[in-house]
Amino acid sequence: MNANHIQQIFKHYIDEFEKLNNSEHKEYYKWQIVKSFRTMMDEALRSENSEFAFKLLKVKKLTCNLVDNYTQPFQGIVYFAESEPETVKTMFKNLFVNSDKEMVQREAAIVTFLKKSHELRDKYFPGSYLYKDDMHSVTTYLFLYDPDHNYIFKSSNARVFADCIEFYDDFGMGDHVKLKTYYRMCDELVKAMKADTALMATDSSRFENGWGVDPVTFYPDTEKHILAFDIIYCCSTYNLFKGITYVRPKTKERQLMQEKKEKAQEL
C-alpha cells in the first residue's frame, strides 16, 4: 500500500472531522447504529414468530440507509419474515454464529444466506428488481452484529479506495467477492490508523463532545473497524482523495501491478 497516500487521506479526514459530524452530515450515526443493532436483533430473534417481522422492521429502520439502497434488500427480508419467520430467523442465526469464525466459515455462511434470500425473493417477488441481497447488504448485517471481527464491503467505495492506496489484489465481483482479500486490505488500513497518533486523538474526541448527542450512545469501536469503514466511505463521499494523484487500472493492469509487487517483495 502507498503509505504516503494513506497519510494524506488521514490528514484530510482529520481536517474535515468536524464537518463530517456536524448537524448537517452526522456521520457519527454509524457508531450509534452499531451500539443498538445487536441488542435489537437478538431481541427480534428471540421473539415469537408472530412478532418477528414487526421487530425486524424496527431493526431495519434503525439501520437507516446503511443497508438499504434503491433495491431495499433489508426491507425484502422483512417481507420474507412476514410469510416465513422461522426461515428468516434461521438465516440470521446461521450467519451470526459464524461472525468470528475462520474466514472460510464466514464466507460459506454469507453464501448460504445469499442463496436462501434469493430463493425467497424468487418465490415472493418473481421478476422484481427490488429486495435483492448482495455482498454489501449481507456483510453489513454481519458487521453491525459483530463489528470487532468484520468489515462492510461496499464495492464502489472499496475499489476506488484500494486504487488510491495502491492495493491492487483482486476482490472478485458480484456475489463472488474474495472477502479474505478485502479484509486483508482493511486490516492493513487499521494497522496504519492505530499507528497514527493524530488520527487516534481525533477519533477519541468523538467520545468527548458528541456534537450535541450523548457519546454513551456510541459503540466504543476498540478495534477501529467502524472508523475504517467511515474513512473508506468518506473518501468517496466527501472527496478525501483531493490532491492525491493516482490511477485506476483496468483488471489486467491491476493483476500485473500486483504480481510485480509480489515479486519485488519476494526479492
Image (cartoon, rainbow, N blue to C red):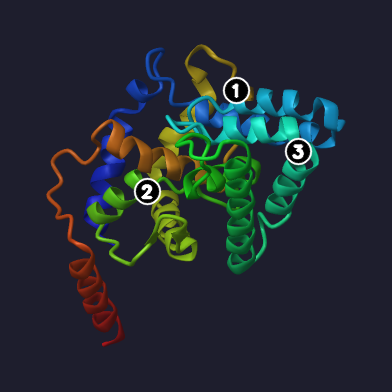
Q: Secondary structure at mark 1?
A: helix
What is the x, y in percent for residue 202? Answer: 41, 33
**Quarter of the image containing the N terminus?**
bottom left
Query: In the rendered image, is residue 193 in sight?
Result: yes
Above or below for 63 versus 147: above
Q: CA distance from mark 3 to mark 1?
A: 20 Å
Q: Given the image, on which type of amino acid does mark 1 rest?
A: Lys
Give the residue at x 35% y 49%.
158
Q: Nearer the viewer, residue 188 or 74?
A: 74
* Residue positioned 58% across, 58% down in the render: 111
Residue bearing the label numbered 1: 61
Q: Residues within 10 Å of mark 1 (few under 14, many from 20)?
A: some
Q: Earlier in the sequence, mark 2 or mark 1?
A: 1
Q: Left or right: 131 with respect to 116? A: left
Q: Answer above or below: position of 245 versus 52.
A: below
Tell which of 78 and 123 is nearer to you. Answer: 123
| Foreground tag (3 vs 2) | 3
Residue 12 pos. (x, y %): 26, 36
Say which quarter of the image contains residue 215. Answer: top right
Q: Please say if the residues under marks 3 and 1 sit with CB atoms less than 8 Å apart.
A: no
Distance Cα–Cα, label 2 vs label 1: 23 Å
Residue position for label 3: 84
- The amino acid type of the residue labelled 2 equals Ser
Q: Residue at x 26, y 88 (%)?
A: 267
Residue type, numbered disc 3:
Glu
Q: Which residue is mark 2?
A: 155
| Chain-order first, disc 3 or disc 2 | 3
Of residue 9 and residue 136, the one placed in the foreground of this image is 136
Q: Residue furthest right?
A: 48
Count of residue discs: 3
**Quick one: SS at disc 3?**
loop
- Name the mark nearer the viewer: 3 or 1: 3
